[in-house]
Amino acid sequence: MKYHENDPGITIPPEIRNQYHAVLGWCAKGVDSLADRLVFRDFDNDDFKVNEIFHDNNPDVFFDSAVLSALIGSCSFVYISKADDQIRLQVIEASNATGIIDPITGLLTEGYAVLKRDDFGNPISEAYFTAQLTTFITGKDVTNIPNHTNHPLLVPIIYRPDAVRPFGRSRITRSGMYYQKYAKRTLERADITAEFYSFPQKYVVGLSNDSEPMDSWKAAISSMLQFTKDDEGDSPKLGQFTTSSMTPFTEQLKTAAAGFAGEMGLTMDDLGFASDNPSSVEAIKASHENLRLSGRKAQRSFGSGLLNVAYLAACLRDDYAYERSQFMNTIPKWEPLFEADANMLSIIGDGAIKLNQAIPGFMDKETVREITGVKGSDQEPPIETGDDNG
């Protein structure tokens, strides 16, 4: 939103073009629309009690920060440290960390991170991570801390990795940036055209050569202009040029919004072009099908990275190098991408009854929570007994 590129237009003079700069936040909206729906719940089958580690590290901020940074920069990094027998987790954005990744495990073989910068952006605290050692560099001071986990204590959280890009790809695509720039240029041209739309150009023909020059500003804002006939009895004629219409800019902006919405899996409503009829939850889910698929993919990618964080945090806490295979049964759990309303709860309830009638015990309260995101009561249901009639 803060970046101003040169407008390649050929009809508007540069001195006028530089007076108008539009600001548009569509790319930020595309990131936030997915990040706000990715809500991490906890780890299931938590044999190593890693949920306690995350609960001690402000999980409401930690998970949202890691997810948002990964969506913007294709990946984020989690720096794991230990102080006073307590595990500390710190999110570092992609611009301040790097490393060499093992494509099999998703862990780093070595890594580097800038932990702190001064007001001018210069690094003042750095760290180099290896499997056996963590080196901290502060100015000319170098401190080595032994690492007994057999892995660098810098873990990447990656969005949509693949064989070509093991560090993933950003949610902000080149196509999305093009549509935002396209809309931004449209708004700037609309602002310039609005000046002529507000004060249309007027003209006068038939004035005598002996008449005094007319003040253009007075002629534009005056409510009454007086013209007298000349010696020959002729009078001037007034006219106004046709004003430029703002409709083409509106249509052009909608075209850019439609392209951006298709790229990001959003709808026109998400970008401020409200529809006439409000949508139900089912209609919103149907219109956001691409967003739902992107969210499910992001949950799988981020879940693998968060599981690696849990694995190394448990190793550092217990000061013991566990095998990564011991965490295979620990499963990351996420809240549903779309919250259920009353109508959806009723439909799911009817479906659960029918499924359990066909296959007894097929759906329990944990399964229903996975679908709806609503946690049931922890109390056991009362056991119904028949009347004792003797």
Image (cartoon, rainbow, N blue to C red):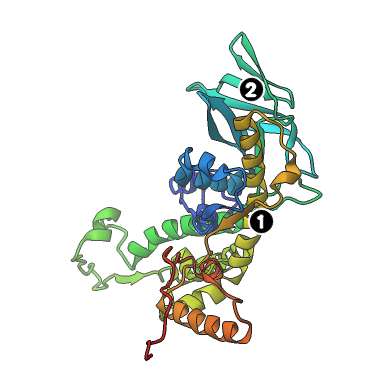
Q: Residue furthest top?
A: 140
Q: Is residue 176 left or right of residue 350?
A: right
Q: Which mark is residue 21?
A: none
Is disc 1 placed on a helix, strand or loop?
A: helix
Task: Name the foreground residue: 300 vs 333.
Answer: 333
Vertically, is 379 above or below 280? above
Tell me what residue is drawn at x 81 percent, y 50 percent: 163
Residue where numbered disc 2 is placed: 127
Question: Picture coordinates of residue 252 (x, y %)?
Answer: 53, 67
Question: Picture coordinates of residue 374 (x, y %)?
Answer: 45, 66
Task: Name the foreground residue: 68 vs 270.
Answer: 68
Task: Name the foreground residue: 126 vs 108.
Answer: 108
Question: Picture coordinates of residue 31 (x, y %)?
Answer: 54, 54
- The type of residue carrying mark 1 is Arg
Q: Please tell me whether mark 2 or mark 1 is closer to you in this view.
A: 1
Q: Quadrant of residue 276?
A: bottom left
- The type of residue carrying mark 2 is Ala
Is disc 2 placed on a helix, strand or loop?
A: strand
Question: Picture coordinates of residue 136 (x, y %)?
Answer: 62, 18
| Sequence-first tag of 2 and 1 | 2
Residue where numbered disc 1 is placed: 300
Q: Residue furthest front?
A: 390
Tell me what residue is drawn at x 63 percent, y 40 percent: 309
